[in-house]
Structures are given as structure tokens and as C-alpha cells.
Image (cartoon, rainbow, N blue to C red):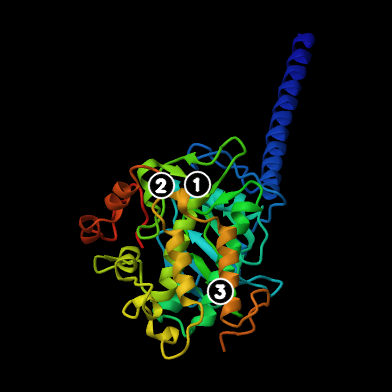
Amino acid sequence: MGIIIGAAVAGSVLVLLLLLAGVYAIHQKKRAERATKQNNPFASWDSNKCSGSIPQMKGPISFSFQEMKKCSNNFSEANQIGTGAYGKVYRGTLPTDQLVAIKRAQKGSVQRAFEFKTEIELLTRVHHKNVISLVGFCSDQGEQMLVYEYVPNGSLKESLSGKSRIRLDWMRRLKVALDAARGLAYLHELANPPIIHRDIKSSNILLDECLNAKVADFGLSKPMADTEKGHVTTQVKGTMGYLDPEYYMTQQLTEKSDVYSFGVLMLELLAARRPIEKGRYIVREVRQMIDRTKDLYNLHNVLDPTIGLWTTLNGLERFVDVAMWCVEESRDDRPTMSEVVKEIENIIQLAGLNPIAESASTSASYEENSKGFDHLYNKESLSSYSEHFPLSKLEPE
């Protein structure tokens, strides 16, 4: 009888010890998971929901949701400085007193999750004065936020449209074009791997306190792997008006697609209006009106009056020539961005400025090319152009 009781007691103790060991193991596992999440903000990244493996980064900088909430004053309306299809942008102040811009994505968007990952991966690899800098990110409590350097004078689009108080004369527009061209040339030729931006437009060119331009928004960008010779076949994405017609027709993306978009941007700098407005496409309009035998190439009705039409616009005709070179229908006939940089530097010298000097001002042959071009920007597509054209492929402007 005593032997039975002793065996029962020993068995009970053994079971108790096993239970305690199990509880301790579970506790230690949870502690390890918490520590992993703190050290790796992408530990819970769902590759199925988030469209791909976790972002590959060098020296990640992460913020918690509470840190973002605090530095943006609880995401107050007073701190909101922008909004778009992706979500909202807030001004924030880090504990170091550094001003930042916080882009807070809408919840539950698989596409935005993919763009979030893409932008983190690319911006941690690029460092250039004319490319926006990524300060950090937040992937916490179901939130996805990107934290950038704060660029106080907003976008080029806001300045050209008159929404900001920045007035851009001819000289300043030349400098903005040169800055943006240098940033894009860096992405194409010096970044490792080379990067095609895929969404160059005036709202993605930001102006700092000295009106230096920075290329921003890399959500649609595409790195070019060494194995990809000349182009990469991919789903068409971009913004109507800036989109390369040859890319649209062939789905073959190259750096020359960015060059086309940049040419449209150059024309926008001259006209200060959206590429597509009231059924008119700026590229076609300039092609039809241009007369190189006349003053200012006969483009007086296209040029923005605030550019300084009452002054001598040195180099403007050459600027138009470069823009129209960029928007050639065949990508083989377009320049590289480094060639564009050299051309704009020469124009700036012609205008009497030093292209190397920093800004001192402040805010105080493809056979079906023609068919492809007509298909994307013909009268029918322009007349039916709306904010939803076509949703599956393009971003509206």
C-alpha cells in the first residue's frame, strides 16, 4: 500500500514538474517573440498578404506606432500636409528636434503594402542630394508608415499651379529641371542596382528651403537586375500624361520610359499646367504649334506668363528642343538622362548662371510607335480621360 502511495505522489510531482516546464517554455518563447519583434519590425510580415518577402535592408531604422503618434501630435489635422490615394502625410518632430514627413498608408491595401516594401528597400540604398532621404519607417500595430526628411516648400506641382506662395521664374525653373535630371541620372546610372522610377511627375518633385529639387515617391519604382538586358517586361503602371506610349504598348520598361516622363515634366515647367487639360495633350500641342523660325518657337500661347515673358528668356528654345528630344515616340531616339543633364547645364550657362553652384534663393526604331502613341493619347482617349482611366493600369493625375 505504501509503495502505491509513494508511486502516486512521485507521478504527481513528475506531472507537476512537466507542467511547470511547459509553462516556462511557453513564457520564454513569448519573450523571445517580443524581443524579435522589437529588433525586427518585419518579424510578423505576411508574405502572402503583403505581396512578397520581407524588405531587404541595410541598417534598418524603425519607429513604433506610439513614437509616430507622439511626434505627429496624434496625427492631428494641424499636422497634416498632404493626402492622396495612398493615405495621408503629416509633419512630425522627432525627439532630436528633426522635422520629418510621415506618410501613413491606408490600412488593408495589398498594393500599398507592396509599394511600402519597395520604397524601403530602394531608399535605403540610394544617397543623393537630389533624391529624397528616408529617415525611417513604422510597421507596427497593423500600420505602415514611411518617414522622410521634411521638405518645406512642397511639390513642384503646387508651385506651378499657384497653390504655394513660391514663384518660379525662368532661372529657378532651369535649376529645378537640372536638379531633378541629376537625381534621375543618378538612379539610372550610379545606383546599385540601377532604378527606373516609373512615376516621374511634378507632384513627385519636392522643393526644399532653398528650392533645390528632390525626386520622391518610389512606390512604383523598379530595380534593374544584371540579368535584365535593356528592358524588363512588366505590368504597365504610371500616370496618364507622363506615361511613355511605347512602354504602354509593349509592356517593356526601360530607363527611356523615365526620360519620356521627364520630357513631359520639362514642358510642364514651361506651361505650368497639367499634361492633359480639357482634352488637350501638351506634347501634341507643342508639336503642332512649334515653329523654329519664329521668336520663342511660336509658343507664346503655351508658355506660362509668370515665367517672365516680358524678359529675355535665354536658352528657352534649346530647353524646348531637349524636351521634345525626350518625348520622341521611339525610345531609341531619346537621350539618356546624363545627356539631358549636360544639355540643361549648357542651357544654364547660356542663361548666365553657374550650373555647379548650389541654389542661393530661398522661399522667403519600333515600327508601331506612331500607332502606339495615337492609341494612348489620341483624341478619343483624351476626350474620355477622367480620374479613373483605366484603373487597372494607370494612376490618374
Q: Is residue 206 left or right of residue 246?
A: right
Task: Of the two numbered discs 3 and 1 on the same chain, state the one appearing first in sequence.
Answer: 1
> What distance separates the C-alpha of mark 2 from that of mark 3?
29 Å
User: For the residues marked 3 and 1, what is the alpha-carbon distance in whole angstroms?
Assistant: 26 Å
The answer to whether marks 2 and 1 mark residues whose Cβ atoms lie closer than 8 Å is yes
Under mark 1, the amino acid is Thr
Give the answer, above or below, for where 256 lies relative to 229. below
Residue 150 seen in this snapshot: no
What residue appears at the point 63 percent right and 49 percent down from the top-left corner? Answer: 41
Q: Which residue is mark 1?
A: 254
Foreground pick, 23 / 156: 156
Looking at the picture, tell me which residue is in the foreground, 259 or 109. Answer: 259
Residue 271, position in %: x, y?
38, 75
**Tag 3 secondary structure:** helix
SS at circle 2: helix
Location of mark 3 (residue) = 347
Rendered position, 51 above or below 361:
above
Q: In the image, what residue occupies the spot 44% across and 73% down?
A: 269
- Amino acid, disc 2: Tyr
For mark 1, give the secondary structure: loop
Other residues around mark 3 within 10 Å, as few (<14) / some (14–19) / many (≥20): many
Instruction: Specify the amino acid type for callout 3.
Output: Ile
Report the side of 38 relative to 228 (left or right).
right
Q: Quadrant of the C terminus?
A: bottom left
Residue 171, image x, y percentages: 54, 81
Q: Nearer the viewer, residue 63 or 118?
A: 118
Where is mark 2, residue-wise?
247
